[in-house]
Image (spheres, rainbow, N blue to C red):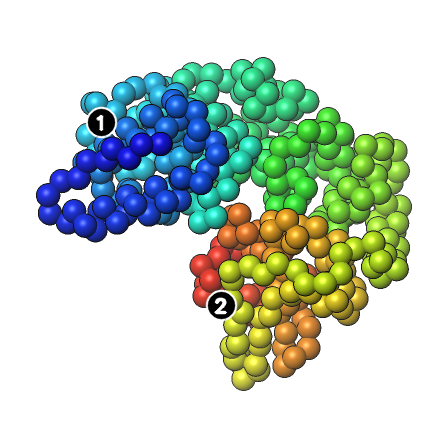
Amino acid sequence: MRRRLCTRHGDVLVRQARLDAVLNQLRPMRNLHPRPVARRLVALLNTLDLLAPELVDVENTRPLHLLARVPWRRTLDTWRGGTLRELYEYLLVGVHYPLPGFLWSVLQPDRHLRVGVDGLRAIQLLALLGSGGSLRDAQKCALIPHCVSKRANHALWLVEEPQPVGQALRRAQVSALGGPRWLGTALGVTQHLARVRSDELWWSRVIQWLSDGAPHLAHHQVQPLVDFLVERWNGRPVWRSRVRTVLRSMAEWHAGLAAQRAVYHHGPLPRSALVGATMELYGVPWTVHEICTSRELFAEGGELQHCVATYQTWILRRRSAIFSLREEGARRVTVEVRLAERTVVQGRGYANRYPTDVEREAIRVWAEKNGLQIRGF
């Protein structure tokens, strides 16, 4: 991608430094190789440098890159400046009715700049609906799975909170099936259901089974149950069994995880860029410590009696980081951070219990220190 960026007089050096920082983030990305994407990105940066230089920032690298990945409805010649959302609406939206609120998650920054299938799905869906298309059209274009019902599509259109497509889809599916709201939220933040999957037909049956059995299911059991279904029931008709029966099998499976240590990776685990913390709350010292070895990961799961050891693959792929919250040196809560989203998505204590109010406060203080969001518990 050629660098042909204009600058005005005045604070030229500061703005040039911003442009250089954005370009340094974008250059290693392979999916900028198509010429139309590179041309749109150069035109976008040129226009923003003239009309809205405050938008040319490393924090906006992901939204700008996503915007360059799809064709625009209008040219940049007649744009007169504004916010990042106003730029999106000018280039992609041609309808006069409000679009679903979850689509605007594309405006959220991503410091790790992981613009993968989910990001492309979100921006393509925004461009399709902004041009007057419907969610049924999105199903024809494979942006939404074909197994999603009309009622679920209607519920998806009503999701207002900005969130990834996969999370909004889980909420809509549960809502269409008459399940409780908390179940859709809990399913949306799990590792396996936070994005649209290739085996959506099987998962749609599972979600219906979970919605029917929600009275026998607790909020803190959703994440362990999804992990268990992936490991032991993947592709099999679990809906022929009762929820209580599967929960008992799940408890036995978690209890036997210690015997499976030999099949896991042993040795150091990759570290994240996040830092630990030491604090004092109500006169009691608390620490947050990152788990960086397999031995420590198994010790954490063994002492707190949960399945954190199964997350080793996610740690090795640098998708998640696991931290241990300790009170006076004693393990209290295991915390999972989704690195791509810089979000704390799980906090579980002994036997998968939820954190207490004091433990939540300690996690919040540590998350603010690292600039993390908290979601899911």
Residue at image coords 15%, 49%? 11
Q: Which residue is mark 2?
A: 365
Residue at image coords 60%, 70%? 289
Identity, as a three-letter code, of the amino acid under mark 2:
Val
Q: Which residue is mark 1?
A: 79
Q: Nearer the viewer, residue 289 or 228?
A: 289
Give the mark count. Answer: 2
Identity of the residue furthest to the left in this view: 9
- The reply, left or right, for residue 295 in relation to residue 155 is right
- The reply, left or right, for residue 360 in relation to residue 263 is left
**Is residue 16 visible from the viewing direction of this image?**
yes
Q: Which mark is residue 324?
A: none
Label 2 crowding class (10 Å Cα cut-off): few <14, some 14-19, many 20+? some
Q: Nearer the viewer, residue 108 or 64?
A: 64
In the depicted structure, whether residue 281 falls above or below residue 266: below
Q: Earlier in the sequence, mark 2 or mark 1?
A: 1
Identity, as a three-letter code, of the amino acid under mark 1:
Trp
**Is residue 300 visible from the viewing direction of this image?**
no
Q: CA distance from mark 2 to mark 1?
A: 42 Å
Q: Nearer the viewer, residue 123 or 361?
A: 123
Q: Describe the element under mark 2 as helix, strand or loop.
A: helix
Residue 201 lies in quadrant: top right
Q: Describe the element under mark 1 as helix, strand or loop.
A: loop
The spot of residue 341 in percent (x, y) is 51, 48
